[in-house]
Image: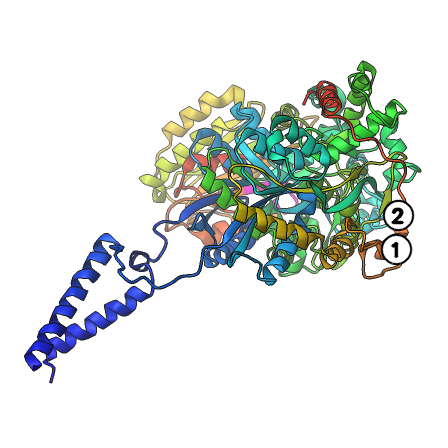
Amino acid sequence: MLTRPFKLITSLVLLITLLSGCGDFGALLSGGDANAITISIAYSPEKDKWLTEQIARFNEQRITVNDRRVQVEGINKSSGAARTEIKKGTLQVTVWSPSASTWLEVLKQESGNQNIAISNKPLVLTPVVIAMWKPMAEAMGWPNRPIGWKDILDLTNDPQGWGRFGRPEWGRFSWGHTDPEISTTALSTLIAEFYAATGKQDGLTVADVQSEQATRFIRELGRSIKHYGYNTLVFSENMKKFGMSYISAFPMEEITLIDFNKFDPPPTPLVAIYPAEGTFWHDNPFIIMASATAEEQEAAERFYEFLLTEESQRAAMSYGFRPANPNVPLTDPISPAFGADPQGVQTVLEVPSAEVIVAVKNSWALNRKRADILLVVDTSGSMEGDKLAMVKAGIETFLMRIMPEDRVGMITFDSTARLVVPMAPLSDNRIDLQVAVQEMRAVGRTALFDALALGKQTLDELPPLEEDRIRAIVLLSDGADNQSRLSLAEVRNLFEESGISIFPVAYGSDADRQVLDAIAEFARTIVVVGDTGDIAQIFENLSRYF
Amino acid sequence: MLTISRIVAASYIFATIVLAVITVVYGPIGWAPLPLPTAAPPIRIDLAISSEKEDWIRSAIERFALTNPTVNGRAIEVRVRIAGSRELIELIERGSYQPTAVSPASVLQLNELRQWRPEFLTEPAQSLVLSPIVVLVRESAATDSVVDPWRAIQDNNLKVKIGISAPTRSNGGLQTILLLAAQYHRSDNLTREQARDPALQDWLANLDRRVVQWPASTGMLTTDFIIRPGVYDIITTYENLALQSFRQGEGRGLRIRIHYPPITTVSDHPYTILNAPWVDSAEREAARLLGNFLLSPDEQRIAMRQYGFRPANPQVTVNLTDAESLFGRYADRGLQIDLAAQLATPTPDVVTELLNTWRSATGQ
């Protein structure tokens, strides 16, 4: 008979022997990943759903390079922001996949390093299109007649507006534009506009970009821009929420349009207009950075091969991308059922040199519409302490990012609302604004709705200028109105059809989001949270709406 | 007796525990007095392949593995490296890549390697498959008026967007500019003087203004032609890639046609085993078996039917009525079995002169 301790030891020995037979003990104990080659990929947000799935699938397959497992980590980062961070050295990745190769050219130019990447191959594709409501596109002759930027300009300049096509009830043509500093679609759209302005399809030069003819074309086209925005998502959401009355058209990637029509489809769909003058393919390049080691480069190649497999490419197509693997045929949703035309792209514009791209990007600030912006600031007792301190810091940041020609004024409100700095070009009243900010004290009750009414009156009383301007109120508050003579409903009526956008910036965890959300809802904007996260970034993003 | 048994068992268990602990803490101790017999390690051969053969060769290697090939009882394992033909040769010349066998697109690249490392090329090269240079045209408004696309490339006054792969990196690009230079001089046998003619350089500089891009490989260019319609109106490529692009274009609603230049040049895809110090006799034998497999009638038929290559094995012939093959399926797209007169294979110094002229003309 074996004694109990002896049995225990015998069992332990048998167990160890069994486990030893299973292979590398160290690997077993460490989960097998201690020796893995880890590569990182920073990719643009529209690829997030697809790449999140594919990275998980790839990691499950335990693919190896030199007998070491390859592990991929994904970082969702917008193209413009990634290029800035790579340039500064704050983002170090093995692979970068912005929306388009254009960003690599910008990065090379801005960093002065032509050898920053070792390879650049397309991952998935999508063309830039003008997304227009189907009835409006049909009124313009779609799908039988090619439509281009020139047609959009003619419609913009026509005082009859949509009456030109027998639909006066739709009013004037309007569209939206994001910022080419951060948005790939906006940058490609702006380059396409310059091509259209010069009548070229290739060979765009810096002189072309700076020519009087092109400047006039871009500014005239810009007159019908109703909303500027930080990113495509806000436009997409608002177009879904407000329908045809929000804007007539918006340049976007074909994948965004397909997503718009495919998921939670609106009653009126958008259709893709492939501009007659030509457009760009966004090639979502797989860029292996020169900083990667030889093993990391090889691991990245294995990952690229995986992403190019038919299974992976078909998955990308289900989200609206066109496959880069030529053996994968185009099927739904790249089809008219989702607003796309598989053969829609007929003419492709030449990607200009980096120098020209940077010139186009820099032209944006000069050619965009100017804005009249009224800051409406809550200085009631509930804003005391951190909230008011954050408001002051936010306004300082905001004023640094506004153009000197923009007219800016300030209203503060507690139990009553008062105009503390009248509207004037920022170049003239910057000091007055800074002094007013420093003098703000938190006292009294909150007359938020009355302050908005005073804001509208102030903007309406501004002497008109020859040029069209964006008119906006930036409302910085915790939203708890308890003193106004006017109600929320009365304020809503007041701003209806006023053409004034209100951007509420919420302060404090106790902010009355119901009121602020309601204001954003009727103003067709979004609520920005002003006191969490990076204040400089929040106000920089906010400044891109003007 | 029981005590002795217990002592033996306890000693064994103790020794096992000690060895297990040492193994876990320090790793395997590597002492095996009676090792079990294991399978002989496989013979690994490295194959350098030009990019336009990638799909065929990768699938052929899978079929080769299914035949369980061995040399001296050792299994054969094939690794491939795919790149542009000139790029592969440059890697070998620089000593940064040591393949067992190479198969660039053309004998021109072997001639180039022979200039630098003649000792590597003592074995005769065998042609695996054949493919002439052709012109592919996407039917669109831009090409409606183009009757002869080869002439359209030559006519610098005609506004079409052209794609040619870089002749310094790709065989397809090199073959194209050889044809263009021969036509420029109305010759089928280029000389050094013709290759460095300043007038030819001016003409190439004008052509460069109409060339959208000079990509690194003909395979990449042809893929781009399919996946980004509108970027190019006309490209030069290999017939086999053109045939594959018909199939790919169908899935994308593209209308594409093929045209043949009046003087032709055929890529012969030579296969040769390197007589290099890193290739031993077993590897040489393994590479020979693979070469024989690729030239077998069955494999040649697959290369023709599925991948659009003209067979090098005379036992297999191209049949335009064979609906199973790419040739038969797309016979109405302008395919031609009989080719025009061939350009004489230029000497390496003519190639070098022409590449220098191209570099000066394009600034690349």
Residue at 64% from the left image edge and 36% from the top image edge: B122
Residue at 56% from the left image edge and 27% from the top image edge: A108
Q: Nearer the viewer, residue A426 or A227?
A: A227
Occupied quadrant, residue B260: top right
Is residue A500 highlighted in magenta?
yes
- The residue wearing badge 1 is B320
Residue at 76% from the left image edge and 57% from the top image edge: B301
Q: Is residue A250 visible?
A: no
- The residue wearing badge 2 is B337
The quadrant in which the N terminus of chain A is found is bottom left
- Give amino acid for label 2: Ile
Separation of disc 2 and disc 1 at Cα?
8 Å
Residue at 41% from the left image edge and 29% from the top image edge: A437
**From the viewer's perspective, is residue A130 above or below residue A112?**
below
Q: How far across and how far down the image is residue A318, in percent?
A: 64, 58
Q: How far across and how far down the image is residue B309, in percent?
A: 77, 49
Q: Is residue A245 visible?
A: yes
Left or right, A535 with respect to A132, comes to left
Q: How far across and how far down the image is residue A438, in percent?
A: 37, 28
Which element type, helix, strand or loop, lies under badge 1?
A: loop
Q: Chain of mark 2?
A: B
**From the viewer's perspective, is residue B162 above or below residue B53?**
above
The quadrant in which the C terminus of chain A is found is top right
Occupied quadrant, residue A198: top right
Q: Nearer the viewer, residue A423 or A386?
A: A386
* Range drawn in magenta: A495-502
Q: Nearer the viewer, residue A434 or A44?
A: A44
Is residue B80 highlighted in magenta?
no
Q: Label for residue B202?
A: none
Which element type, helix, strand or loop, lies under badge 2?
A: loop
Label 2 with label 1: CB-CB less than 8 Å = yes
- Give amino acid for label 1: Leu
